[in-house]
Image (spheres, rainbow, N blue to C red):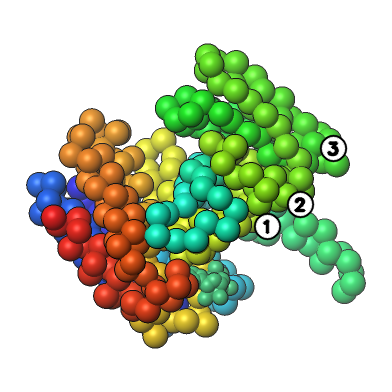
């Protein structure tokens, strides 16, 4: 498997190094071969090349079987004319990675304050309330006067259809429950269309139970009884917010794995940001990126019909759960292991 690795900013390099050690262990356990290329993105690239993402990286990741993007300091990157491109947006948009798949589950060995659950948020990834991806040119936030701003939210039939089908297909392979999260009572036209399309898509998947919940009410439902949810489909920003909540309810934002998938490419990327407040201190939880990398292996194995990659992905998930159940944990999970030491425990279990 040809993999491009882009460690990113903040805690990115630390959690990426640990993730690569876990992949190395999975390679020896499952007889996989990785061909790895590593490149700078974010601040390191800006300092060295005058841009946060070198244009040739797009071709590199296109040629690869998948890539890993560490968290980047998106908040710092405000002016594209100065090379400050948001790497996450750049790859999601350029490669049309329309489905952001964010699983969240509770773990034996961790407190489950709202009870046990195992769900997946499927978030549309290419439009919605994201000012940097809605227009062919320019941002979709406008300063009308010094005191008035208009932000555009784009919702299209095509993007609704493909995310609805991705979520339905996933639910059909799991517990066959789909929850559509929307705000069609207020965003009557846009979310009305999203809801209609999800309803229609679900009719193509026999046996799928579908419910519909307003995004504000969803915040209460997911805290009250997360066990009732299996696959949740929603638009871009609602999914971004909801999946941080589900990751934290599972034990920590640091457990939030995430895959950005299109038809031909996929990018593993932790659900959280670059966490500059804890960067460089060997205290970040690397589980998010480890789980994201496992999702990438599973995607690749399914696409190329190579079951060993799917087995390796399951092995990594199981090893992480076993490490946590055995009491190994980073600070955010209530333990005292550093990033590297925790990753080493997971890698040892993966290796067997
Ligand atoms: P950015 O600007 O890149 O989004 P941020 O700090 O604003 O960074 P997050 O990185 O998502 O946003 O972090 C939110 C909070 O969660 C921070 O307090 C951070 O320390 C914590 N956090 C995020 N990721 C992890 C992790 N992997 N392990 C432990 N704590 C984390």
Residue at x 63% of width, y 34% of height = 179
Using the rendered image of the protein, determine whether residue 22 is visible from the camera's viewpoint.
yes
Please tell me whether mark 2 sits on a helix, a strand or a loop: loop
Residue located 71% across and 32% down the image: 212
Which of the pair 146/322 is nearer the observer?
322
Label 1 to label 3: alpha-carbon separation: 23 Å
Q: Which percent across, then down, holds residue 130?
A: 66, 55
Q: Are marks 2 and 1 in contact (CB under 8 Å)?
A: yes
Ranked by sequence position, the earlier of labels 3 and 2 is 2
**Point 21% across, 62% down: residue:** 347
Which residue does the numbered mark 2 point to in the structure image? 152
Q: In the drawing, what numbered circle is on residue 131?
A: 1
Pinpoint residue 244: horizontal percent, then vertical percent.
Answer: 58, 58
306 left or right of 213 in image: left
For label 1, the crowd category at 10 Å Cα-Cα, with few meaning under 14, some 14 to 19 and many 20 or more, is: some
**Residue found 52% across the figure and 56% down from its top:** 112
In the displayed orientation, state which residue is furthest to the bottom.
281
């Amino acid at each position: 498997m040809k993999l491009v690795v882009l460690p990113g900013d903040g805690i990115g390099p630390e959690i990426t190094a640990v993730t690569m050690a876990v992949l190395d262990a999975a390679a020896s356990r499952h007889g996989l071969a990785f061909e790895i290329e590593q490149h700078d993105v974010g601040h390191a690239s800006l300092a060295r090349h005058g841009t946060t993402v070198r244009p040739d990286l797009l071709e590199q990741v296109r040629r690869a079987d998948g890539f890993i993007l560490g968290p980047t300091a998106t908040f710092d990157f405000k002016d594209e004319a100065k090379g400050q491109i948001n790497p996450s947006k750049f790859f999601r948009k350029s490669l049309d990675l329309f489905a952001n798949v964010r699983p969240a589950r509770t773990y034996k060995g961790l407190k489950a304050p709202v009870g046990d659950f195992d769900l997946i948020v499927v978030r549309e990834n290419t439009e919605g309330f994201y000012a940097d991806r809605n227009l062919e040119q320019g941002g979709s936030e406008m300063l009308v006067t010094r005191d008035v701003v208009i932000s555009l939210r784009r919702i299209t039939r095509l993007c609704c259809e493909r995310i609805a089908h991705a979520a339905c297909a996933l639910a059909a392979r799991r517990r066959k429950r789909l929850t559509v999260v929307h705000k069609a009572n207020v965003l009557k036209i846009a979310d009305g269309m999203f809801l209609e399309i999800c309803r229609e898509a679900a009719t193509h998947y026999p046996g799928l139970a579908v419910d519909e919940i307003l995004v504000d009410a969803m915040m209460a439902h997911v805290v009250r009884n997360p066990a009732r949810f299996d696959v949740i489909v929603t638009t871009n920003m609602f999914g971004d917010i909801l999946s941080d909540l589900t990751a934290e309810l599972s034990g920590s934002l640091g457990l939030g794995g995430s895959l950005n998938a299109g038809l031909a490419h996929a990018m593993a990327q932790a659900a959280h940001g670059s966490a500059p407040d804890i960067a460089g201190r060997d205290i970040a939880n690397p589980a998010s990126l480890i789980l994201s990398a496992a999702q990438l292996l599973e995607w690749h194995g399914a696409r190329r019909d190579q079951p060993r990659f799917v087995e390796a992905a399951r092995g990594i998930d199981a090893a992480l759960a076993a490490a946590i159940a055995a009491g190994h944990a980073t600070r955010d999970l209530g333990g005292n292991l550093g990033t590297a030491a925790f990753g080493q425990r997971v890698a040892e279990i993966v290796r067997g």
